[in-house]
Structures are given as C-alpha cells and as structure tokens.
Image (cartoon, rainbow, N blue to C red):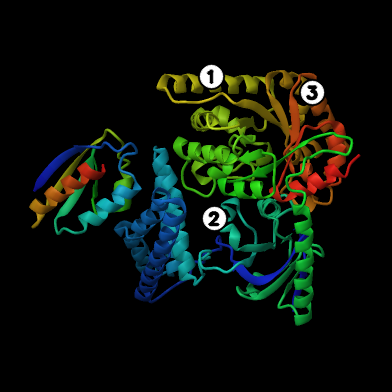
Amino acid sequence: MLKFSGKSVYKGIVLGPAAVLKNNDFQVKRERAEDSEAEIARVETAVEKAQEQLQKLYEKAVKEVGEASAAIFEVHQMMLEDDDYRDAVSSMIRTEQINAEYAVAVTGDNFSEMFANMDDDYMKARAADIKDISNRLVRNLAGQEDMDFGSMEPSVIIADDLSPSETVQMDKSKILAFVTVHGSTNSHTAILARMMNIPALIGVPMDLEEIHTGQTVVVDGFKAEVVFDPTEELCRETEARMKEEQEKTELLQTLKGKENVTRSGKKIHIYANIGSVGDVGYVLENDAGGIGLFRSEFLYLGRNDFPTEEEQFQAYRQVVQTMAGKKVIIRTLDIGADKQVDYLNLGREDNPAMGYRAIRICLKQKDIFKTQLRALLRAAAYGNLSIMYPMIISTEEVRQIYSIVDEVECELNDAGIPYKIPEQGIMIETPASVMISDELAEMVDFFSIGTNDLTQYTLAIDRQNEKLDDFYNPHHKAILRMIKLVVDNAHKHGKWAGICGELGADLELTQEFVRMGLDELSVAPSMVLKVRKNVREME
Amino acid sequence: MKTFSYEIKDAIGIHARPAGLLAKEAKKYESKIVIKKEGKSAEATKLMAIMGMGVKCGNVVDVEIEGADEEKAYEDIKAFFEANL
C-alpha cells in the first residue's frame, strides 16, 4: 500500500486502475555514440513505430471527427518520410557521433524554426507539426508509450500536470479520476474534474517512477487521499462508499424538472458552463435551464491552426439547435494568460494574467475576431444565442466591438448570408468594469460576473500560484460587495446580471446570491441540481 | 528534359497534404523532378523543401522533369497538379 495526501478539487470516491501519463517535455541529453549505424537503425525503428501510431490515430480521428480533421495525422506520416529531415538526422549522428534522441530533437528544432520564420501564417503553423513528429520520435526512442485512449479501460489518470490541450484530447468516458503532482485548485484539470463530476486530487507528492499503469488505486476526494495497491479491506470499504455516493446522486436526480424557486416564490435561472460541443450532453443530463458560458477557446486549443468560420459556425449551430430554444451564451475567444496556442505566436510575457489576452487580442487582431463574429451571427439565426465579451475594462472597448459587429453585419448582408444580431453582454471580471458598471449597463444587454479573474485581480492573487492558495479567500467581502454593486447597476438600467465563475457554484453562497437579486447562476453541469436544491430549501 | 508551367489554384497554395502526396507521387519515377519558383527550387520528392518554398495561390511554378521515364512522369505529374493544386 502506498498512500499520499493532496488537495481535493472535487469530492467523490473511486476505485480503479491507474493510467500514468509521463511528462512529454522531458530533457533530451546529448551523449556520445561511437556506433553511428546502430543509432541510425534506432531512428528507423522509431519511425516505423511512429507510422503505426499515426495510422491508428488517423483511423480513430476519421471515425470521431471526420476525414478533413484527421488529415493532419496523414501529413505527420508524410513528414516523417521526408528525405531532408531524415538525412539531417543521419548526418548529424555520423558527423557529431551523438545519440539518436539528441539528433532528432535538434533537427526537429531546426526545421520547425525554418517554418516559424516563413511569412505565411499557414506555413508558420506547420512548425508545431514538426515539433510534434520530432517529440513522437524522441518518445519512441526513449521507449515511452503513447497514451492510447482508444483501447484504454476506464482509468484514474495519474500525471505530473495536464495542459488544456492534453485534456481536450482525452476520451472523457474513460476517465474515473485525476491525480496530479502539480496544478492549483483553479487549474484546467480541476475545472474539468468538476465539470465531469469525478474525483480529483492535485498537489500529490508522488514519484511517477514508482507508479505504473494498471496498478489498482483508490482516490478519495473527501479525505484528499490517494492509495495505490489498497488492501482488500480498503477496496471493500471504498466500494461501499461508492454505492452510498451513487444513492445520494440519485436523490439529487429527483430534483430534475423542478423549478429553481425559493419557498417564498423567488426565482433564479440556473445555467451550465461548458467547454466543448461534447459537453452539451452533461448540460441536458443535469437539467440546466441553458448554457451560461460556452468557452469558445476550446475550439482553438489542441490544434495547429485557427478553426475556420465554417468549423466554428457548425459547432455553435449544433449547440444552439441541441439546446432547442434554451439560452446559449457564447463567450468570444479568451486566449492568452494560462491558455496558450502555439500558432498564435503570442510569445512569453512577464505577467500574462494582466497581458495580451481575450478581447485585447480580438481588438488588435481583428481578422481573428471577425471570423468568430461571422460564425456567431450566422449561428444566431438557428436558436437562442447570446454573445459575451471577456476582459472588458472600458466603454470605449464596447464601442469598438459594436463597430466591428456592424462591419460583420454589412458583410453578411452584402453576401446574402442569413444571420441574426443576438443579445450581447459582457463579462465583469476586472475591478475597472465593476466601478463603471453603471455606464456599461447602458450599453450592453447583460452582465455575467467572472468571479475567478475578478477575485484574482481584486485580491492581487495569481490563480496559478499554488503558494497563494492559503491567502485566496473567494468569500472576501470586497468581492461580495462588488457583485452587489454590479447587480444593482444592471437592474437600474433594466438589464440582467449573472455569475459564471466558480463562485456561482459555491453552495455556501447560493442563498446570499438569491437575496442580492442575481438573475442567473451559471455553474458546472454537475452542480446544477445541487444549487437547485439549495434554492428550493430557502425561505 | 520536359517542362511545364502551372498556376496554383488551391486557396492555401502548396500546403502540407498536397506537398506530401506530390512527394509520394514523384518517388515513383526515376526521373529527377524539380519545382522552381522565382529563383528558388526544390526536388518534388522533398516534402519539407517544397513547403519551404512557400508557394501561394496564384503563384506560377515551373516544373522540370529529366530522366529515363520523363515522358510518363510528365503526363502523371501534370495531371497531379491539375487535380490537386
């Protein structure tokens, strides 16, 4: 038995096999290798293996996302066969007498640099593909297994940390729990775990070298403990508690179809937050009244190039149609800070949370914004869609946004493409927007308070800094007063206000939010019924 | 030696997938097949070198084919450009 404690981000309990994800970004060491031909032969073997892996990925992707999106794996296969790339690796191994791993890594860097420097956005984005195939070869050379989610049985994912693009690629039906060495309570792993209703532990000081895939593990989110190779007694106990939890969940299910109304008749909308089209299933399963936050950036993550207008339009249309008349609030691109995409070439910033991100990118790089707005306006013709703009700090920004929306409208008009100008609101997530919420309320249709960022900016606490978790008080009076101010200013102008941050799902605050007069709370799908229960128990 | 000129019609130019298919096609022939654009050139069998030329939509490339099976290669490669690029 091997036991560790960590920090729990979702309270649940589970017993299952471990699936260990090793860090992809490991250091490649330069080593002297006398037998060059043997090293070149190792590269050949690694390429063959990579071809098989890519073929499998291609076939899986064709089935799941269609041939057009799967073509990227075909391109990777072709790149691996490129003479120049392969000759560069071989000649480096021979002339410098070095190991295969190092030659592949350096060659990959050189070629990807060449593409990154081209004056064509499409070609620039190919730099990421070259890095990808080189990393795959290095992994194969080092004997590291590619995670194969396709044939994996439902498992507890054990990792150092997970990036947003890694989590996007996972097959969510195969994940029982997350256990990571790093990460903070606001990391993407944590958000995903809450969304999926599965136990998750972060900050677990385990040594990944000591753990192997297939090992039995108990994840207890209540005690914030993870136990590898549990005793038979603990397994029995865990199974009994899983059953108990299951029963509790079923009880909550009896609240399905019931109104969100207090005993004295006060009503509030409870919507759900989602990050991809696939999450709509969770929204309906949990009986949310709508989607209060659709994080559109997940369309941009985990890929090598911008999603096209058509791809975005299809995704948005599918969501509004599936929601059949229920409100769907789509937040425009909120990238930057902790969510990075290589093809945007944003570069490193000293202080990314206060940096070039979200609406700031959209207002500077108008093409990106216009593509998304066209897709949104077109999809709005198919259902109850609202647009929400993130990171607003001034009325001037809202004016600029509206003038871009006007441009897009004219273009769609001229092209004779059907569209609708939907309800447009803003995120309130900067202290600046709170202070001028009276002026902003005159301009927009609604406010949605993003409590995660609002809290980090107001308390001057970096969400990603684990050391500060003890100082982070989400119930800080300053935040609650700001929420009240925003709600009052919205109502003064006949607009509605909601919360779409983590705080909206804080069961200790539900009743206070209802009393403050919030019109809507948007929470993880798994929290919808729990919040409803709280509302219905209130006077 | 056989040659032909071709104006690229694909909206993103000679991008990754057609460049890969072209390389595969070109490897079938003994003849040396070279793509030229504004002083830059690359062998058709070399995917990354072709992509590195950054050929865009509307650019005109010259294709030179020289070798024992140049007649057949000329017909097939020309047909390939017309169908894919």
Which residue in the structure is indicated by mark 1? A406
State left or right for residue B33 relative to residue A469.
left
Same chain, labels 2 and 1: yes
Q: Residues within 10 Å of mark 3 (few under 14, many from 20)?
A: some
State left or right for residue A284 relative to residue A454.
left
Inspect the image, locate mark 1, and give the three-letter code of the amino acid beneath it: Asp
How many numbered marks have been drawn onto this rendered protein structure? Answer: 3
Q: CA distance from mark 1 to mark 3?
A: 27 Å
Which residue in the structure is indicated by mark 3? A491
Query: The residue tagged with tag 3: helix, strand or loop?
Result: helix
Relative height, residue A234 to residue B54 (above, below)? below
Query: The residue tagged with tag 2: helix, strand or loop?
Result: helix
Same chain, labels 1 and 3: yes
The answer to whether any part of residue B6 appears in the image is yes
Q: Quadrant of the N terminus of chain A?
A: bottom right
Q: Earlier in the sequence, mark 1 or mark 3?
A: 1
Residue B84 position in % (x across, y down): 26, 44
Nearer-the-camera pick, A257 or B68: A257
As drawn, which residue projects farthest toward the bottom? Answer: A232
Question: Which callout, 2 or 3, points to the residue nearer the camera?
Answer: 3
Residue A320 position in % (x across, y down): 57, 37
In the figure, residue A137 lies in which quadrant?
bottom left
Query: The residue tagged with tag 1: helix, strand or loop?
Result: helix
Q: Earlier in the sequence, mark 2 or mark 3?
A: 2
Q: CA distance from mark 2 to mark 1?
A: 36 Å
In the figure, residue A435 lies in which quadrant?
top right
The disc label shown at residue A169, or none: 2
Q: CA distance from mark 2 to mark 3?
A: 41 Å
